[in-house]
Image (tube, helix red, strand yellow):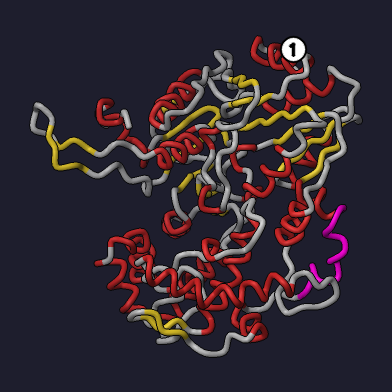
Amino acid sequence: MHTPTDEQAHAADVFRAGHHLVLQAGAGTGKTSTLGLLAAGTHRRGRYLAFNKNIAQDAAGRFPRTVLCKTAHATAFAAVGHRYTRRLNSPRQPAWKTGQALGITRPVRIGAHEIGPRALSHTVLRTVTRYCYSADRTLTGHHVPRLRGLDTPGDHARLADEVMPFATKAWADLHNPDQGVVRFEHDHYLKMWALTAPTIEADFLFLDEAQDTNPVLEEVFAAQRDHAQLVMVGDSAQAIYGWRGARDVMTGFDATALTLTRSFRFGPLIAEEANRWLTLADAPIRLTGSDTIPTDIGSLDRPDAVLCRTNIGAMAEVMRLLAAGHRVALTRGGQQLAALALAARDLKDGRRTSHPELVLFASWGELQDYAAHDPAGRDLQPFVDLVDTHGPDAILTAVDQLTDEQHADVTVSTAHTAKGREWPTVKIADDFPPPKDTDQHDAQGRPIPEPVSDTDARLAYVAVTRARHHLDLGGLSWINTHPPAASAG
């Protein structure tokens, strides 16, 4: 490791003094090496918890032997999950088959909508998943997800009444270690473990990527406070998984708050760009770059990576790059895109689809109308345009033409999937829209745009901090003309 920065040395001192710690570590500021520094300064036994297996394996090579590096799931598996090994690798089956086995056999009418057994089955399984992500002790109606089209509180309450008996039955089914009708997933035993109020045997605990922690794990971690020294590390400004049940647990955690702000990934120009978005996100840190790393901001003809806001934006980018003759890789492969294309094909052929985003639509025409006219469907418009332009088969063909990253000219990724990654040169795709204009005008008569939302600012921050040497702002260039006064939201 290079000579510790003042911030890293200070963190080591506070840790040695025995305080609980929250470490806000900006993009590329060396958080894992900082944790390594903390662990190396003590003979006590520690545990390092990460959400992701690759991160845990990587950390294991960088910590002394006194620290055990595992994912939360591996810890839960050792305690509870191993009893369910027989069920864990059961074959995948469509949700409607699981629903049928639970007794979901007939459609339900709510308002103007008929909800078929398929949509109901999906909703039941998603209800159980949402409960597993939460810190709640019991499964209740508020775990039932909202369905597109059932937007009034009354409709949603009726949906919850239909779903809850089956969700309760599904959760009971999952407790049988030998057999059952619901496919047993890793999140199920994690929840079961959390419900036992476990004690993690260690003198200190490191929780990495804390800003993306599900409430279920946050509760287990915080409950170790009486017997272990707790260190939470992450970047609140990278909390971009709210939709997955994660919430930023760092800002409210009762501990000494410290920051790591010196980025070893890029030079001052990209740090400055990052700080514009950190300001808009009202984040607790600002970054400084490393003077020794040459960085540039400006247009790029052949970037190493193109980062998109959505899966649909990524699909459009892939189609464009393939048509131009490039060898293209897509992070996380094309499964999600293929699933959307197959769903579109079903709807176009007059069949319903079980794709969770599109279950309520009986036909492609109905989806086109919803995307065009219903404010709640606006985010589906680019998908509809893509399918109307190319057709589902062309999209599926494009997915088949993808290359792996080693052999590609360019990697396409969503900003979400790019988290934790970096490339020498990065271009931001065109699907990051500027804020809409309000009805108000400035002194020159120009419309004043809405403030940039926290969520958009955080995603933009993640995107612009993936580049080491050259960043093409592309679809985020509107920030250059966005009036700073309007962005004080």
Up/down of 410 relative to 249, above or below: below
Task: Please tell me whether mark 1 sits on a helix, a strand or a loop.
Answer: helix
Q: Which residues are magenta?
A: 78-90
Give the residue displayed 49% in from the left and 37% down from the top. 426
Up/down of 261 relative to 117, above or below: above
Quarter of the picture containing the C terminus is top left
Q: Position of residue 459 (x, y in %)?
A: 46, 40
Residue of label 1: 13
Give the residue displayed 78% in from the left and 21% down from the top. 38
Q: Is residue 68 visible?
A: yes
Q: Position of residue 134 (x, y in %)?
A: 62, 53
Quarter of the picture containing the N terminus is top right
Few, some or many C-alpha atoms within 10 Å of disc 1 (few <14, some 14-19, many ≥20)? some
For this view, does 3 lie left or right of residue 269? Answer: right
Give the residue displayed 65% in from the left and 24% down from the top. 255
Give the residue displayed 79% in from the left and 15% down from the top. 16
**Of residues 371 and 72, which is closer to you in this image?**
72
Q: Position of residue 148 (x, y in %)?
A: 40, 68
For this view, does 226 lie left or right of residue 157? Answer: right
| Kind of residue sitting beneath label 1 | Asp
State the residue lying farthest toward the top. 6
Magenta highlight: main SS:
helix
**Of residues 339 and 397, which is closer to you in this image?**
339
